[in-house]
Image (cartoon, grey):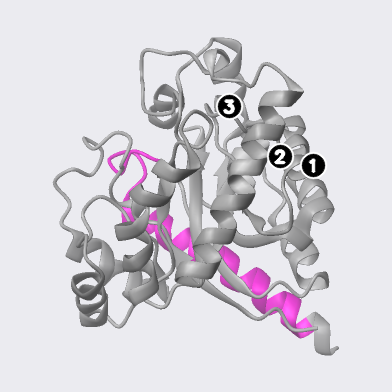
C-alpha cells in the first residue's frame, strides 16, 4: 500500500528554542524561503513564528507553506487538569485556525532539556505506579478535551531529559493511557533514550502513532555524552543529533514499518544542531532528500 505522507521540517535546523543563541540572528523568512526551495510542504512552529492563528497562516502563505503542528509545553506531571485546560486555549486555537490535525504534547514539568548545567542522568522520574496511573488519567482527560474542543489529536512526544525518555518509560506511558493519547514518534530521541532499534519500538506502537519526527544520531557523540554525563544542550552543541542520512538510525526500516501500517500523516525532519557547524540549508536538504528517496522507494515497491 502506498505511503500517503507529507514531508515537513522543524525550524531547529535554522534556529533553536532551547538554546536561542543558535541561529539567533537568522530571520524566520530565511528558514521559510530555504525550506520551500528544498521541497518541504510545511513547517512546525518555533520561537520566531507569529503567535496568533491568522498571523501565522498569513506568514506561511507568503511562502506557499502550511503549519504542520506545534509543540505544546504541558505540565500535567505536576499540575492539575483544570489549569492545563485553561492554559492551552490560545495555542490550540492557533493550530485549529491553521487546519492542523495534531498537537505535539511535550511534558515540561521538571524537564532538564533546557538547562545546560544539569546532567542527563538527573532527569525527573515518577516514583510509583500510582504516580504513573494518575498521570495517565490526566493525559487521557486532556487528550479527550483537546479532541472535543479543537478537533486535534494529542501526539505525546517522549524526550531526552524528561519524565518519558526510555523504552521502558514509553511502555509504561502506553499502558497507563488509552487510545486518545497518541505518540509523536521521534527516532532520534528513541535512540538517544536507549532504544537501539527504534523501528522495533515503532512497530510495537505504530497503531498509536499520530506524528513522526525524523531525527538521526551520531552514535559516537551520543555515547560520549552518556558516558561523561553531559547535559542535553551539551549533547546538542557536541553534535549528537543530526538529520536523516547522517547518522546511525535505520530509516529504511522505519519507513518500512510505517508503510506496512498505512501511516498517513507528516514526516518531519528535525535535528537540534549548531548551524555554524551544520549549515542549515545543506543539512535540511540532506534530510529532505533522504526521506523523499525512502518514501519514493517504498511507494514503488508497493505497486511492484
Nearest to viewer (mark 1 / mark 3):
1
**Residue 180 image offset from top left, x and y in percent:** 67, 59
* Depicted 296 relative to depicted 233: above or below: below
Q: Main secondary structure of the magenta part?
A: helix
Residue beneath the point at 45% across and 72% down = 100
Closest to the observer, 115 or 99 = 99
Instruction: Point out the stretch of residues depicted in magenta.
Output: 272-300
Q: Name the disc covering residue 175, or none.
A: 1
From this viewpoint, is residue 301 visible? yes
Residue beneath the point at 27% across and 40% down = 276
Disc 2, SS: helix
Q: Which residue is mark 2?
A: 173
**Residue 49 image offset from top left, x and y in percent:** 23, 60
Which of pointers 3 and 2 lies earlier in the amino acid sequence? 2
Residue, far bottom: 303
**Residue 202 image offset from top left, x and y in percent:** 76, 52
Q: Are marks 2 and 1 in contact (CB under 8 Å)?
A: yes
Amino acid at each position: 500500500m502506498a505511503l500517503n505522507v507529507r514531508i515537513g521540517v522543524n525550524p531547529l535546523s535554522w534556529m533553536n528554542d532551547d538554546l536561542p543563541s543558535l541561529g539567533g540572528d537568522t530571520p524566520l523568512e530565511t528558514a521559510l524561503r530555504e525550506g520551500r526551495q528544498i521541497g518541504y510542504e510545511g513547517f512546525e512552529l518555533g520561537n520566531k513564528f507569529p503567535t496568533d492563528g491568522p498571523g501565522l497562516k498569513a506568514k506561511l502563505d507568503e511562502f506557499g507553506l502550511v503549519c504542520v503542528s506545534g509543540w505544546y509545553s504541558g505540565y500535567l506531571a505536576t499540575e492539575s487538569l483544570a489549569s492545563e485546560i485553561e492554559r492551552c486555549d490560545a495555542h490550540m486555537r492557533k493550530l485549529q485556525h491553521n487546519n492542523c490535525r495534531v498537537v505535539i504534547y511535550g511534558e515540561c514539568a521538571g524537564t532538564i532539556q533546557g538547562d545546560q548545567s544539569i546532567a542527563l542522568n538527573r532527569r525527573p522520574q515518577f516514583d510509583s505506579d500510582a504516580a504513573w496511573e494518575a498521570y495517565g488519567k490526566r493525559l487521557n482527560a486532556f487528550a479527550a478535551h483537546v479532541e472535543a474542543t479543537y478537533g486535534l489529536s494529542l501526539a505525546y512526544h517522549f524526550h531526552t531529559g524528561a519524565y518519558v525518555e526510555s523504552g521502558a518509560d514509553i511502555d509504561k506511558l502506553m499502558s497507563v493511557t488509552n487510545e486518545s493519547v497518541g505518540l509523536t514518534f521521534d527516532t532520534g530521541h528513541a535512540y538517544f533514550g536507549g532504544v537501539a532499534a527504534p523501528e522495533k519500538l515503532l512497530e510495537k506502537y505504530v497503531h498509536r502513532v499520530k506524528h513522526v519526527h525524523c531525527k538521526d544520531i551520531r552514535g559516537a557523540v551520543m555515547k560520549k555524552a552518556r558516558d561523561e554525563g553531559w547535559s542535553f544542550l551539551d549533547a546538542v552543541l557536541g553534535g549528537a543529533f543530526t538529520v536523516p542520512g547522517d547518522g546511525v538510525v535505520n530509516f529504511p526500516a522505519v519507513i518500512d514499518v510505517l508503510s506496512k501500517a498505512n501511516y498517513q500523516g507528516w514526516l518531519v525532519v528535525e535535528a537540534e544542531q549548531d548551524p555554524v557547524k551544520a549549515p542549515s540549508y545543506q543539512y535540511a536538504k540532506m534530510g529532505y532528500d533522504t526521506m523523499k528517496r525512502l518514501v519514493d522507494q517504498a511507494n514503488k515497491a508497493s505497486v511492484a
